Amino acid sequence: MHEPQPSAADSAPPPLDRFTASRYAQLGADFVCAVDTVPLPDPYWVGFSQRVAQDLGLDATWKSSPQWLAQLSGNHSSPESQPFASVYSGHQFGVWAGQLGDGRACSLGELDGLEVQLKGAGPTPFSRRGDGRAVLRSSIREFLCSEAMHALGVPTTRALSVTGSDAPVWREERETAAVVARVAPSFVRFGHFEHFSHGQQTAELKTLADFVIDQFYPQCRETTSAAPWASNPYAAMLAAVTQRTAEMVAHWQSVGFCHGVMNTDNMSILGLTLDYGPFQFLDAYDPTHICNHSDTQGRYAFYKQPNVAYWNLYCLGQALLPLIDEQEQAIGALETFKIHYPNALAQRMATKLGFVAAQEPQRALIESALQLLAKERVDFTIFWRRLSHWAATMDLGDALVQDLFVDRNAAQAWLEAFKRLHTQTSTDSPFSVSQRMLGVNPKYVLRNHLGELAIRAAKTKDFSVLQQLQAVLEDPFSEHPAHAAWAGFAPDWAASIEISCSS
């Protein structure tokens, strides 16, 4: 139902002056430009995250405040904070796109050291003839997925709130406007570095790199490693970003997450999942799946994500070359991806199988499992969850997992190998193994059709589905029997949902 709107008398004014100027904005006019947000007519709350609010130091009454509703809709600014948009460039679908920038996002400043950014609060100098608005549909998807990914343990930007309005916005059809407030330690992207490097602005490139190192990678100034890149702080930063990115993508692959538009301007320098547009969690396990309807060449297919991440890191390395003593240092830093990513993925997948470490036998079992899933397009999330329950007894006569496969003999043979390897390598009881697996294999992920259910209800100003879905996604490893249907197979109509870059 419609979230009740607060009156001015409902609470004392919130501490809007708690916003402090963004550290990034202090880099100057070469990096950011001041913007004036465009008020959202008659805004109302669509959703909010109390968990993020707590991280920002907000008390439990904040969401009852008309001032916060106005501020997070772009209708009011803190006297301590001038909204700004940042400039960056980037490669889009593998092609240099030149200058881009925050076209529909602006930062309000910082709360407790975290930057708060509004997406959809009007045009900026970087909007490129766009209206600067976001629509309710895409804002709900970003809000829900940000918090769902965080609950899964995946590095990500967060989302504090979504506010809506009846103001019309035109995309493929008439939609309504919304603003999502997202939160991160920083929104600096690979594309920020590409922008200054491509423009041969070496002084600004160095200022940006020094800022990122000083704020987020101070260890890169300490030469404590014998690695060839360690003596140069910018090469050391490249190595650190490479390893964080490898960890992030390994986590994506382990939960079946497709980003959909891995352009260099959508890659976080902190290794955070950034810009939730045409994303999707896999239903059937198809490594070649393309979730972005606009990706006609399949550049960002699920199985290509690791290689694209490395390609993007290579672009970052090229951008940093003016600051790195020798090209070999940059290459050495980038090469760590080829070791760190496969090891990170193997460890995550071994954990999904209930093993403590990923040795060669576990890696072989992982590979055979993925081949079996791909051959029959078995539902990815349901397989891992059922396997987690089955592991409590490892009863080969229990068809809980076999029922997912047409080739039951192949499934049976794999389960026998799974049981045999656990018996050979561990003294843990099946129950202990099962409990470990249930803690890493979610029952619930934000499938496209679940997001669509929340969106359809929200279009009628019924936000109860969104609230219930959010509560489940914030605790995805628990059973939630009242919502068990949301853990079932995707309905046939889910296949008709098309998500594109405009989403």
Image (cartoon, rainbow, N blue to C red):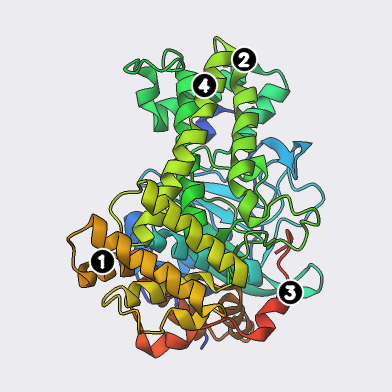
Q: Nearer the viewer, mark 2 or mark 1?
A: 1
Left or right, 157 with reference to 89: left
Q: Nearer the viewer, mark 4 or mark 3?
A: 4
CB within 8 Å, label 3 to label 1: no
Q: Is residue 14 visible?
A: no
Residue occupying image coordinates x 72% and y 52%: 123
Q: Amino acid at mark 4?
A: Gly
Label 1 and label 4: CA atoms lie apart by: 38 Å
Residue at which label 3 appears? 175
Q: Earlier in the sequence, mark 2 or mark 1?
A: 2
Q: Residues within 10 Å of mark 4 (few under 14, many from 20)?
A: some
Q: Nearer the viewer, mark 2 or mark 3?
A: 2
Q: Amino acid at mark 2?
A: Pro
Residue at which label 1 appears? 433
Q: Earlier in the sequence, mark 4 or mark 3?
A: 3
- Give the secondary structure at mark 2: helix
Left or right, 162 with reference to 364: right
Label 2 and label 4: CA atoms lie apart by: 16 Å
Q: Earlier in the sequence, mark 1 or mark 4?
A: 4
Which mark, residue 322?
2
CB within 8 Å, label 2 to label 4: no
Left or right, 374 with reference to 475: right
- Give the secondary structure at mark 4: helix
Which mark, residue 425?
none
Q: Earlier in the sequence, mark 2 or mark 3?
A: 3
Determine whether 334 is above or below 403 in the image.
above
Residue at which label 4 appears? 332
